[in-house]
Image (cartoon, helix red, strand yellow):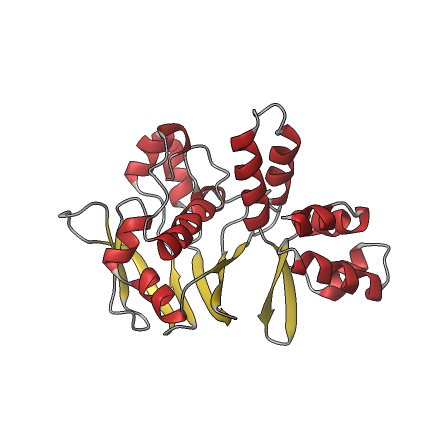
Amino acid sequence: MDEVFRALADASRRRLLDSLNARNGQSLRDLCAGLDMTRQSVSKHLAALEAADLVTTVRRGREKLHFLNAAPITAIADRWISRYDRQRAEALADLRAALEGEPVDSPTFVYTTYINTSPQRLWAALTEPAFTRRYWGGVALKSDWQVRSPVLWQDAPGAEFRDLGQRVLVAEPYRRLSYSWHGFQPEHAAHFGWSDDELAARLGEHRSTVTFEIAPYGDAVRLTVIHADFSPGSEMYRAISGQLDGSGGWPELLASLKTLLETGEPLPEPTPAGQAG
């Protein structure tokens, strides 16, 4: 946590984060072009931000793209807001909101966390219904995890498994898993208080894709979640990133996954005000 505060204390690094907040997923060349900084300075500051886990990188072809990582900001907000009242923590809350803010074009959500477990056990936690049910608020995901196979969704024990149109895109055990994401369902309208017209508008959003990248990190595992291919101004993006009221999104789910794998128990059920969608 000290590294995060040290990284945020530098004005040039905050400018880089502002640039990524305005347009996430930029290359080094893009960042240099948008800021009055030398390539060497940008590289140095990006290295410090990566060391603090405020920025994470994803390879796409020959390019290395840089994304904001919400995990450290989430940890700071959770620790300090739980210890002090909201008024005293307002600056941190505003910072978290800024770093997780929605870009003006098609947004991409990237979240990196480190878990004291093995790649094999993490893979099981992502693919086995008994595991997903424990940290996903009772939801079980089932598939044979072959490319083009459906990913079925069970809302509660004993309920019928539903096909919401999700399909496996990549399945490389212990390394990489990717599948298409579901669209909004009628129950989401009731949960978020949407009208029929509001739900209809959200049903027209482009179907997004989530990818889990798993890599050994000493005795732990580095998990990077990349959720992309949203429509511009996507409400689903706001939901999965935890910006939509009533949805904890990936930050809450991944915190619960990490806690389950490291302690044997997921996070406690949230109160209705902070319940994930």
Determine whether 156 is above or below 218 in the image: above
Image position, residue 165 (x, y; %): 30, 57
Q: Going by the picture, which residue comes out furthest to the left?
A: 158
Labels in figure, total: 0
Q: Is residue 21 left or right of residue 224?
A: right
Identify the residue at horizontal 86%, vertical 55% (top origin): 36
**In front here: 6 or 42?**
6
Identify the residue at horizontal 52%, vertical 71% (top origin): 218
Q: Is residue 181 left or right of residue 153?
A: right
**In front here: 89 or 199?**
89
Identify the residue at horizontal 49%, vertical 71% (top origin): 216
Residue 98 quadrant: top right
**One can see residue 107 in this view:** yes
Q: Is residue 265 left or right of residue 198?
A: left
Identify the residue at horizontal 65%, vertical 55% (top origin): 52
Q: Is residue 177 left or right of residue 6?
A: left
Determine whether 121 is above or below 248 in the image: below
Image position, residue 235 (x, y; %): 47, 41
Residue 191 quadrant: top left
Image position, residue 126 (x, y; %): 34, 61
**In front here: 193 or 116?**
116
Q: From the image, which quarter does the C terminus lie in? A: top left
